Image (cartoon, rainbow, N blue to C red):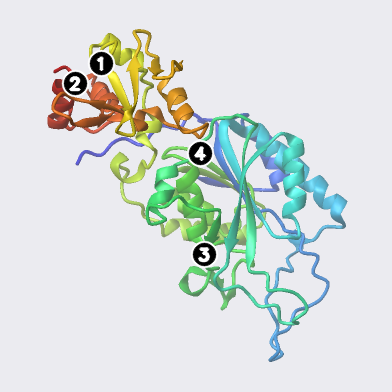
Amino acid sequence: MMAKKMPPSISTDLPLNQIIEGDCLEVLNTLPEKSVDLIFADPPYNLQLQQELWRPNMTRVTAVNDDWDHFEDFQAYDAFSQVWLSACRRILKDSGSIWVIGSYHNIFRIGKLMQDLGYWILNDIVWIKTNPMPNFRGVRFTNAHETLIWASKYKGARYTFNHHAMKSLNEDKQMRSDWLIPVCTGTERVRKDGKRAHSTQKPQALLYRILLATSKPGDVILDPFLGSGTTAVVAKLLHRNWVGIEKESHYIEIAQERLSQVKPVPYQDILFDVSDKKRTAPRVELSQLLEDGWLKPGDTLFFQRNISQAARIKANGKIILADGFEGSIHEAGRRLLNGSPCNGWQTWFCRTEDGNFYPLDDVREAYRKSHSDPFVTPNEDRDDEIKNALKG
């Protein structure tokens, strides 16, 4: 198995794979415009805690009472949020995306600001904690989840989403927007002098899923509130470049110690590139199959192998149904499905003289491989079988 060189990063002006000590409101303005592929932000939640919390056995709850989570009022928090969100949008590539995590205290305010700034919300993900802290006073429901907003830079922007990789993590079923992941416990929870080193440390499983889903090897991942360093740890493990911003020196020490212990396997495409090869493959039109002799004008296609739902291929690459409708393979399929979305490559089939059916997608893949397309894996026997059968 040959190792492939890590994809180079084009953002050479960035301090790659480094933690920048400082206030993110100041540091973000020093980073180059459109230089980052993915942002994960875990900002202060502005929890507004007014008093200490105690369990029924009179032991004190270790709550989030750090100075960095205190704001004078909602207006001050909104002003802070707008500044860092604006700065992040400036340095985000047009093809990039951003994740912001929060609780009911702040996520709705964050979402409103993101929309006002031009971000386009793609999903809200609910992180369901399988082991949440109970509400000890019994005056509210147990807060058992946090919300993540996933957004592109603007409406209609192209962005990375490794859909099939997420299916693989979910027993080959499309992944839903509710994620059951436990909070950090045991050896994963970083401790110092027997106490939690960071009050809001995020689980590695959460960041693993986010980075695997929405970035590629060699991409630049930015975390403007790096904290204990989980984003950088997972980025290093998955061969992504990263930049972390953190103003608390004791958190930087913790993150650096964690990073020093990460020893990723040397990079190989076959291990770390989980992108959908078909989605990123060069486009092939039905007309190209006609021009190259893989199909002929007048050939018959069958919808979902149904011989009663046939169409003839026109010389211009369109197909025509029995009722006279003319369009692309996708448009014709949509018509037969009463307007439902249709991928014509997968729903239209060729039929050979001996009665075998081949989906158009197989013909397209064989055509690509005949042109030495690096996006597909050779299967020469199968490809020759298709080509010979179709050409009679």
Name the residue carrying label 4. 220
* Secondary structure under the numbered disc 2 in the rendered image: helix
Question: Are discs 4 and 2 less than 8 Å apart at CB?
Answer: no
Horizontal arrangement in the rendering, residue 122 relative to residue 274 (left or right): right
Rendered position, 221 above or below 383:
below
Question: Are discs 2 and 1 less than 8 Å apart at CB?
Answer: yes
Label 3, label 2: how far apart the Cα atoms are: 50 Å
* Secondary structure under the numbered disc 3 in the rendered image: loop
* Secondary structure under the numbered disc 4 in the rendered image: strand
Name the residue located 45 percent from the left edge and 50 percent from the top edge: 174
Rendered position, 243 above or below 259:
above
Q: Mark 3 packing: few (<14 Cα in 10 Å), some, or many (20+)?
A: some
Name the residue located 64 percent from the left edge and 61 percent from the top edge: 146
Q: For this rendering, which residue is in front, 243 or 145? A: 145
Name the residue carrying label 3. 181
Quarter of the image that includes the N terminus: top left
Q: Amino acid at mark 1?
A: Leu
Horizontal arrangement in the rendering, residue 33 relative to residue 384 (left or right): right
